[in-house]
Amino acid sequence: MKRRTFIASAATAGLFALAGPASADKANPDKLRIALLPDENASTIIQNAQPLKLFLEKTLGKPVEIIVTTDYSSMIEAMRFGRIEVGYFGPFSYVLAKSKAPEIEPFAVGVEKGKPNYNSILIANVDGPVKELTDVKGKPFAFGDQASTSSHLAPRAHLAKNGLIGDKDYKVVHLGKHDAVARAVAAGQIPAGALSEAIFRVLVETNKVDATKLRQIALSDPIPNYPMTIQGYLKPELKDAIRKAFLELKDPAILKSFRVEAIAAATDKDYDVLRDMAKVLQLDIAKL
């Protein structure tokens, strides 16, 4: 799931951090602000967000503003300080957000191929020095955003389970976006990297990366899908209406924009696997 529209007339999405509350009554705001994870090209997300915006405005009877933040961290801070009412987080960025804003609640998750989870794909340039996972040793490896699950946490944990520790056995390189990782590896700018398998497949299908330049070297363990979260302080009636709108969402075009076939209910416990991955990497979530 991904999407967002730049805040009205802001020169950059970063200006969103200065926005004030949606209305005086934060429990029942006049307008709902929904942030979508900045894990792909912003223009693609903005375009894909419009059917969702129209559906929610019709269903909820409120204006909806789709927000794009500059990066994962700014989205976490926006949720933490009540600058958005609903957030569509990556799994690990949700865990980080929850650690800073315990009142937020995950309530929905995408289902694809009958499962509410997905994988990270680890790829290498076909003409480069990395032919299999063990070849990563001593070389640069590209990740996306540091708070990304499928483009950082999961593949880095997978490498660690195979005896490859970042900045000890290989050089960690962060490129920000999933598509940036795929393009850099395809171009031979870096020998190997990782990103969401679902995003990778879309990049290949839409010819945004040349599949003949890439090889798969591994898949991560299953990752719980992106959670939709809500501020706990909203009126119970409003929270129920938002949950209902997403859980009963059937429009194929909107579901496709999230790269899912259905929406299912989610709970915080579903994301304990991410907390376990953080332990493998000896990350202190509270300090991230």
Image (cartoon, helix red, strand yellow):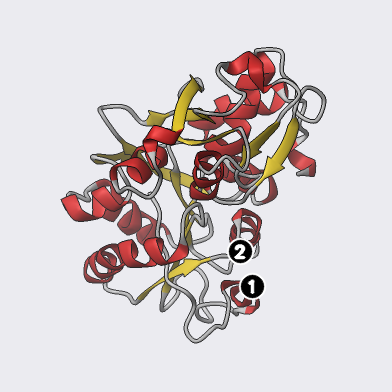
Side (left or right) of 150 relative to 135: left
Side (left or right) of 277 relative to 271: right
Q: In which quarter of the image is the C terminus?
A: top right
Residue 84's spot in the image, x, y percent?
Answer: 52, 66
Side (left or right) of 26 relative to 3: right
Disc 2 crowd rating (10 Å Cα; few below 14, some 14-19, many 20+) is many
Front position in the image: 181 or 70: 181
Label 2 sits on residue: 78
Which label number is shown at residue 17?
1
The amino acid on which the numbered mark 2 sits, given as a three-letter code, is Ala
SS label for mark 2: helix
The amino acid on which the numbered mark 1 sits, given as a three-letter code, is Ala
Q: Is residue 177 visible?
A: yes
Residue 133 position (above or below residue 287): above
Q: Residue at x 32, y 75 (%)?
A: 62
CB of mark 2 within 8 Å of CB of mark 1? yes
How far apart in space, not on screen, are marks 2 and 1 (Cα)?
Answer: 7 Å
Residue 61's spot in the image, x, y percent?
Answer: 26, 73
Disc 1 crowd rating (10 Å Cα; few below 14, some 14-19, many 20+) is some
Residue 3 position (above or below residue 202): below
Front position in the image: 240 or 19: 19
Residue lying farthest left? Answer: 251
Q: Is residue 35 visible?
A: no
Q: Which residue is drawn at 25% across and 27% down?
A: 114
Q: Which numbered disc, 2 or 1, marks the residue that appears first in the sequence?
A: 1
Which label number is shown at residue 150?
none
SS label for mark 1: helix
Residue 24's spot in the image, x, y percent?
Answer: 54, 81
Q: How many labels does the image show?
A: 2
Residue 126's spot in the image, x, y percent?
Answer: 49, 28
Front position in the image: 37 or 235: 37
Q: Which quadrant of the structure image shows residue 77? A: bottom right
